[in-house]
Amino acid sequence: MNLSYAAWAARWRVPLGFALGAGFLVWSRPTARLLAVGGLVALAGLLVRGAAAGYLEKNRELATAGPYGYTRNPLYLGSFVMGAGLALAGGSWPLAAAFLILYALIYGPVIQREEAMLHSQFAQTFECYAASVPLFFPTLLKRREGPATGMGFRWARYLKNREYEAALGYALVMLFLAVKMRLS
């Protein structure tokens, strides 16, 4: 992994996401069917993100319970599913392709960088966890063996991690797409 590129990707992931979002708002072409199906897919991603945020104590504890028992990166997985759903709802295939490319180029290195940080911070505990839980795509058949760390989902963690911002963003994008569809 190129550490300078990973650091760049981590720094620019949000501004690049906003730039893609601006293009999405201009070039999206929602239909009722795409809005319904894409909205449900995006909602599933939002729920994964929300569940993960309620288990996460950033930089204090290695989260392995809840969604973290199925994938080491449920927040990023939720973001991917949410973004794919919104891209589908928007009905612009070039923008959907741009999302997939941007996601791979930005979040691949960011995930690797965070893995290295977690390994240095939690050492042996992280190695055991990483050996039994997939990096990104979850397995629903086999959960992590051994005790899960963390005390379960907490709304206070959800709020502290500001996950409500993703829910607000989802609601605003869906509202925008519905209005754009009606005006078309």
Image (cartoon, grey):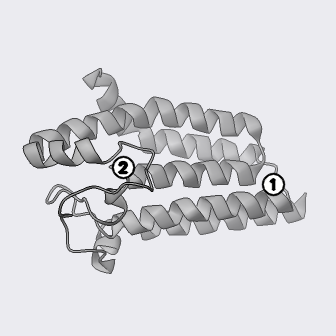
Could you tell whether 98 is left or right of 163 in the image?
right
Residues under numbered marks 2 and 1 in contact, where contact means CB atoms less than 8 Å apart: no
Residue 46, percent across and down? 52, 63
As helix, strand or loop, the secondary structure at mark 1 comes to: loop
| Residue nearer the viewer, 47 or 127 | 127
Q: Quadrant of the N terminus?
A: top left
> Amino acid under label 2?
Asn
Marks 2/1: CA–CA distance: 30 Å
- Residue 99 in which image quadrant: top right
Q: Amino acid at mark 1?
A: Pro
Q: Secondary structure at mark 2?
A: loop
In the rendered image, which residue does mark 2 sit on?
73
Q: Dot 2 surroundings within 10 Å: few (below 14), some, or many (20 or more)?
A: many
- Identity of the residue drawn at 61% across and 47% down: 21
Instruction: State which mark lies toward you, 2 or 1.
Output: 2
Please name the residue shown 33% across and 79% down the image: 155
Residue ID for mark 1: 30
Q: Quadrant of the C terminus?
A: bottom right
Viewer-proximal residue among 60 and 65: 65
Q: Is residue 17 above or below residue 150?
A: above
Residue 158: image quadrant is bottom left
Q: Label for residue 134?
A: none
